[in-house]
């Protein structure tokens, strides 16, 4: 007597909904230039228009190392152009060294005007930037 062959059936295919591809998040701001006016201000220029309504000027520090003086940002800042902000400086200690540097913390409050992308800040960038 002949027995018919047996087959293992594959499990049924499960159709899953495709995930919707969301729009990418905000793009980070990029610093493209920075200038120091000794003991007065620092001017920052970005790759696109910025919003400084939440600026935390004290997060911006310029270390004038050759003079052994550090300056901290003070006040609301002033937009010179949609991409350029001037931040007033006040003396705040200091340390010696060969170059003038800029440091700005991530909580500086400078954001892109178009998508709200934030500026992550910088650490010890030689001024003027770019050289």
Image: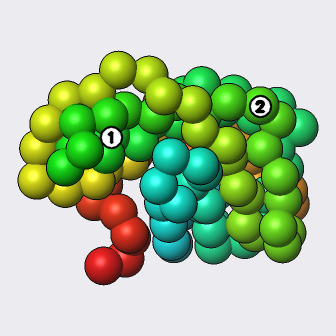
> Residue drawn 28% across and 27% down?
94
For residue 32, side relative to residue 66 (left or right): right
Instruction: State which quadrant residue 122 falls in.
Output: top left
Asked if residue 24 shows in the view, the reply is no
> Residue drawn 59% across and 49% down?
40
> Residue drawn 38% across and 47% down?
102
Classify the position of the N terminus by image quarter: top left
Q: How is the image coloured?
A: rainbow
Q: Which mark is residue 63?
A: 1
Residue 40 position (above or below residue 58): below
Tag 1 and tag 2, C-beta contact below 8 Å: no
Asked if residue 47 shows in the view, the reply is yes
Q: Pick whichever, 44 or 100, lies toward us.
A: 100
- Badge 2 is on which residue? 75
Instruction: State which quadrant residue 56 falls in.
Output: top right
Residue 42 position (above or below residue 107): below
For residue 3, side relative to residue 85 (left or right): left
Give the percent coordinates (x, y) of residue 71: 46, 34
1 or 2: tag closer to the N-terminus: 1
Q: Residues within 10 Å of mark 2 (few under 14, many from 20)?
A: few
Q: Pick whichever, 45 or 39, lies toward us.
A: 39
Instruction: State which quadrant residue 127 falls in.
Output: bottom left
For residue 28, side relative to residue 112 (left or right): left
Give the percent coordinates (x, y) of residue 91: 48, 28
Q: Secondary structure at mark 2?
A: strand
Q: Which mark is residue 130?
A: none
Q: Secondary structure at mark 1?
A: strand
**Measured Cα–Cα span from mark 1 to mark 2:** 18 Å
Give the percent coordinates (x, y) of residue 62: 41, 42
């Amino acid at each position: 007597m002949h027995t018919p062959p047996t087959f293992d059936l594959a499990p049924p295919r499960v159709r899953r909904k495709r995930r919707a591809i969301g729009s990418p998040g905000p793009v980070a701001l990029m610093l493209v230039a920075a200038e120091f006016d000794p003991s007065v201000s620092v001017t920052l220029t970005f790759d696109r228009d910025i919003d400084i309504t939440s600026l935390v000027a004290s997060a911006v520090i310029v270390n004038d190392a050759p003079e052994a003086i550090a300056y901290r940002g003070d006040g609301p800042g002033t937009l010179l152009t949609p991409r350029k902000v001037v931040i007033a400086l006040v003396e705040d200690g200091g340390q010696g060294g060969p170059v003038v540097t800029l440091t700005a913390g991530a909580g500086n409050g400078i954001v892109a005007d178009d998508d709200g992308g934030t500026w992550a800040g910088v650490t010890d960038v030689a001024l003027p930037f770019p050289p």
